[in-house]
Amino acid sequence: MASQYSQQYAYRAQKSLGLVSGTPDYTPISGFESPEVAARTFAYSADGRLYAYALPTVVRIFQAEGAQLIQELPLPNIVDLSFSPRGTYLSTWERHAKLDDGAQHKNLRIFSVSTAEELIAFTQKSHDGWQIQYTISESHAVRLVSSEIQVFRPAEWSKGIADKLKVEGATSVSLSPGLNPSVAVFVAEKKGAPASIKVYGLSTLGAAPTCQKTFFKADRAQIKWNTLGTQVLIMTQTEVDNSNKSYYGETGLYLLSAAGNFDCRVTLDKEGPIHDFAWSPNSKEFGVVYGYMPAKTMLFDQRVRSLHDFGPGPHNFLSFNPQGRLVIVAGFGNLAGKLNIYDRRTLNKVATIDAPNTSHCEWSPDGRFIMTATLSPRLRVDNGIKIWHCTGPLIHVQNTEELYQTSWRPTSVDSVPAFPAQIPPAPAASESVKTLQETTQKPAAPKPAGAYRPPGARGLATPAIFKREDEGGLPTNGTGTPPRYRTPVPGAPGYNNNGAGSPYGGNGNNNGRRSVPGAPPPGSAPADGDKKNRKKKPKKEEGEGQQQQDGGRRGKKSAGPSGLSTPVVPDASDAAPEPATGPATVEPEQLAAAVGELGLDPVAKKARNLNKKLKAIEELKDKQKRGERLEATQLKKIEGEAEIRKELTALGVTA
């Protein structure tokens, strides 16, 4: 029963809202009725006990088990919801608006779930980071307001702020889990001052930080605590990559200990952005997906020592199951949507799942099932939910038009069966999968697209340089076209001395000409057909009449000046064609002499450049005489005229 209890999931679409039970039936929860109007959001409490959704005029709170209605709050225009960890309090957020009386709009409100009473309200203009952060026991609540960390006691909301700390320039704050909570505060880089991360103990907020680190190239940060709350990972990111290597800016990853006894940068051995990172539930290791495609996926311990390399591949997503036994390494978004599942104990691959167009991926609380979903507006076609077993088989399918949101019902790890030593087999698929298999014809196996290869590399065994790294190809390190297939630049070294493998002159003796397949080699005698085509046409005499275009046979007549027909005598040039001549050959000594005449010695070049500068200065002087306003740089050029003339004199040139 516990496994079935943990498998409930919720979904929200344009025309429907529902709760669905888990294995093996996947049937709608009895007693739950979908509202007639579209819901704006839904949320589970962290312990999975409560479920709530927001309609345009009301918020309803249910018991998740059995879908029994508990409270109905008449709150219009609610956009987002959030429960406290134990489900004692419900926070609501609506869009900030200007009130007619000029008062501040309290758009962030906190209610008691048991009494539906509003306990406190705040002004929160931004939707980003609007949630109140609670300790796991709900003894304290934290929020960031204009670089000030405010601490409240939820049992005494009416007393207001219990403690506070001002951190100049703070842009984000994260409260750790665990019995001794800490607060991580990030300060972004500004006006040349470096960015920083500081960790404070929640009970000693006014004291010095227990751990801090400064670094450059950080406009914003993503903060993730381990489950115990003893260590924190910070991924920093800039809006712009100054090296022009990445469209997404520069990224960095740092590990800090809450106790202050360890901090370091996570050194990654491949260039490129950090796509994803995640802690294992055991709090002793973490994984990182990084680098230009194909990206690398590495496993590190809590001292940033590398444990395992999963190899390169088209990946940008990493997730441990709640028991830490299985790991998903996948590629979503503009990647193919292939999920690779690994056993953490043996580090062997368990299964590969093809789930194209996936925009949401999540482990079930018991760690045996994976939910993938295609959501709108990321993609407006083929919206729906798929449930997979961790060994690969598809268990359940639910196709839903304009699906906006879905998630498993949270359940603590202690409330579900322990993950067995041997990975369990997959259960029988639901009726939805059987119906899908019966109504859908088996499609032909898709032809693998592979990487783009230029025409010269097609039709043969693919060279290693054109293979992806994960296919056994050579490492690219973010480079583009191999040098061999780049168009040579005139004047560059080797432009006229291409090697035998180059498409611009196969044997290196073609003087820079591109060889055309089927064409005769340069300088060779032309074929008979070429001789015929190269025959010169006879020149017309002055006063000669218009000849007919028939090849000049004897006895052919043409109209003369008197209009009488006279015989035409063929020209001697028509008797036999002139022999065709090959391309003119130039001796190396003649070529060197011609190049020497065109070249300039260094003194002449410098004198020419200085004269150009003088000419530009004269033009600026003319503008100045006409009353035109010159910029500071242009005035500085005029001031340098004397120095230029001195240089010309030193070269022996009169300006």
Image (tube, helix red, strand yellow):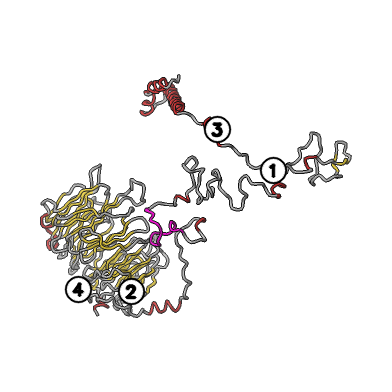
Residue 580's disc number: 1
**Cα separation between marks 2 and 1:** 75 Å
Q: Is residue 367 above or below residue 192?
A: below
Residue density around tag 2, few if under 14, some if 14–19, many if 20 or more, within 10 Å: some
Q: Which residues are magenta?
A: 463-477
Residue 414's disc number: 4
The chief SS type of the magenta part is loop
Nearer the camera: disc 2 or disc 1: 1
Q: Secondary structure at mark 4?
A: helix
Q: Secondary structure at mark 1?
A: loop
Q: Which residue is mark 2?
A: 391
**Cα separation between marks 4 and 2:** 23 Å
**Cα separation between marks 3 and 1:** 27 Å
**Cα separation between marks 4 and 3:** 88 Å
> Which residue is rendered at x = 73% and y = 42% of the image?
578
**Cα separation between marks 4 and 1:** 94 Å
476 in the magenta segment = yes
Horizontally, residue 299 falls left or right of residue 480, namely left
